Amino acid sequence: MLAAASGPEDKLIEVWTEEHGGYPAFDQVNPTSIRAALEKGMALSKAEIAEIAGTAETPTFANTIAALEDSGRALDRAQRFFGIFTSAMNDAAMQELQTEMSPVLSAFGDDIIQNARLFARIRAVHDGRAIAGLSPEQRRLVENYYRNFTRRGAALNDADKATLKDLNQRLASLYTKFSQNELADEESYQLTIETEADLEGLPESLREAAAAAAEAHGVKGKWVFTNTRSSMEPFLTYSAERDLREEGWRMWIMRGDNGAATDNNAVISEILQLRTRRARLLGFETHAHWAVENNMAKAPQAAMELMMKLWGPALRRAQEEIAEMQAIADKEGAGITIEAWDHRFYSERVRKATYDLDQNEVKLHLQLENVRDGMFWAAERLYGLRFAELDGLPVYHEDMSVYEVTRDGERVGLWYFDPYARGGKSSGAWMNEYRTQERFKADITPIVSNNANFVKSGSGPVLISWDDAVTMFHEFGHALHGLNSNVTYPGVAGTSVKRDFVEFPSQINEHWFPTPELLNRFALHVDTGKPIPDESLAKIQKALKFNQGFDTVEFLASAIYDMKIHLAATPDGTIDPGAFEKSCMAEIGLPREIVMRHRPTQFGHIFSGDGYSAGYYVYLWADALTADAWELFEQRGVWDPATAKAFLDDILSVGNAVAPDEAFRKFRGRDVDTEALMRLRGFA
């Protein structure tokens, strides 16, 4: 138990017991309090582990596995604040703390894994699990603990454990360096436009946002496009100034690859080498084999087979799309050959010519707050969830808002929303889990957040693109996965599932966004308040598979690179990430008009941590599950209550208490049909 509060750090590690089920004390958080909370949390956790490992009692589920589930809670809370602030409020002081503490936390985690007496107790419980009278969830928890400890080196000899610990500490430092370099390049480079004539083609909402960004950057009267996806992709889509498109595109794709102090090439080479050494130490041929072994795919070859099954049809479609763009450019007398910086611009021209659909007109119907409310409406209709905004709860930035989530009047959890770009915030969009659901010691409700990087408008509502709206629904799908968790133990709750299953709930949630029922209620014109006309809505539905070649090839190029470079890495050799990119893309035949969605030096999914390394393919694996599951919804009606209830009960609520293949089989009535993915993308 904690002593009486003696400093701000105690508010970070105490149990959250205030109203609304408790909430994080963001008003007490700063780099100093986070450091103190981490240090105190590690001390408490160390004592708890020593007690569990040192008891003379015969190992049982209760005194070993359940005790471990109840240990480290103070440190877990401190680490969540650390993770939140390194991704969303990563100023210079926080970056200094991140550099200092990342290897320390890595070493502390290894100390627990490498505790021989603790592992002996876990192994004893695991060996006797069949006759211990455990519930299915308890048995799965035992198996997860044993697998996690063995995969992380608990069974190694002392010398190899020491080597592994050194490798992990160095990798933790490299991951921090990679992410900080990427953030630095996003914040240091910008495209500044001096004259209004150079804004040709840009919609008014984008111009206003660029003017506001210019004022924020101290160049009022100009227009600034920042080096982030949320700013640069719209610019590349609509700017009629080809030279400026090229300038912006090169700035964007060269993040981390500028030969300066923030260059990530050497960082990547060392990461690959150390990961391979670690994999060999753990008994695996490559890091890819180690990473995929714990996923549904089981082996790199299975992941590669699915990717290559889609690559051929996607490549052919992408080449057809490029030919259509070139034809439009020729017809307009542009006198150019389509290049990568032209792709998004001419793709829009093709969309308009083929479907008479102007994304600028569609965007006028996509107000950020309305899209958010549409997510709430869908969650209520499907799963009975209601969202009510709360005032007065502490937040770490004034842009945030907080909502209490209920079902049938009972609290389900809290949802935080942090929508806007700012300095010190990682680019992209993501979901965080501030607190995990459990019923172990008490009925604890989850707290989750969604985070994005929308650019604030100069005045009036923020308008977002169709793709950004889809991304909002995707990330909200992760939030729903966390909120709907209904298990006993936190170790198998919410999104704590296999990496190639965790994207399933998020990707299927995207499919409710373009439904007429939702769009007619929430895609309301910013000026008139009227819904999208029926004629335009029909065009949107027809165009849903538009540009699938580009989207799929852009993604697959990154996923294939990720897998191939981790298969090719050796423990002693050095791989040049850029040279490997060129040879890999040439091998698979990537058209020059398309680049990887994430070039190596900014590929944070795989180089800022282990999370998605040799695992970027998981989005495709999950999309195969999504496509098959969505066909069932379409057969029964996409808002069918019984099907939604089955999805809630069989997928969203079970976390990792049920094996993912079993969970899917229970929902679908059979194993996944991967041909559904080909049909979904229009490649059948």
Image: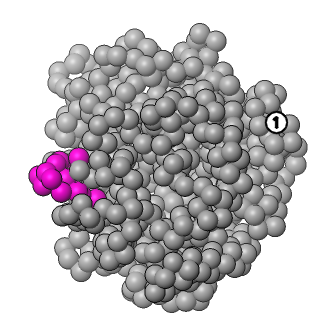
Nearest to the observer: residue 612 or residue 207 = 207
Q: Residue at coordinates 46% horizontally, 28% vertically from top-left?
A: 415
Residue 546 position within the rendered picture, expressed as x and y whole percent measured from the top left: 65, 62
Asked whether residue 108 appears in the rendered view, the answer is no
Q: Mark 1 points at which residue?
A: 637
Position above or below: 49 against 561: above
Mark 1: give few (<14), some (14-19) or many (20+) Cα within 10 Å.
some
Residue 266 position within the rendered picture, expressed as x and y whole percent measured from the top left: 31, 79
Is 101 displayed left or right of 603 in the figure? left
Is 89 displayed left or right of 666 in the figure? left
Q: Quadrant of the N terminus?
A: top left
Quadrant for residue 257, please give it. Answer: bottom left
Q: Residue furthest left?
A: 218
Asked whether residue 321 appears in the rendered view, the answer is yes
Nearest to the observer: residue 10 or residue 378 = 378
Q: Residue at coordinates 76% horizontally, 42% vertically from top-left?
A: 663
Nearest to the observer: residue 232 or residue 504 = 232
Q: Residue at coordinates 37% horizontally, 27% vertically from top-left?
A: 401
Is 66 displayed left or right of 238 in the figure? right
Position above or below: 229 against 576: above
Q: Residue at coordinates 22% horizontally, 27% vertically from top-left?
A: 28
Position above or below: 347 against 578: above
223 is within the stretch colored magenta: yes
Q: Which stretch did the figure color magenta? A: 212-225
The residue under label 1 is which amino acid type?
Answer: Gly
Residue 665 position within the rendered picture, expressed as x and y whole percent measured from the top left: 82, 45
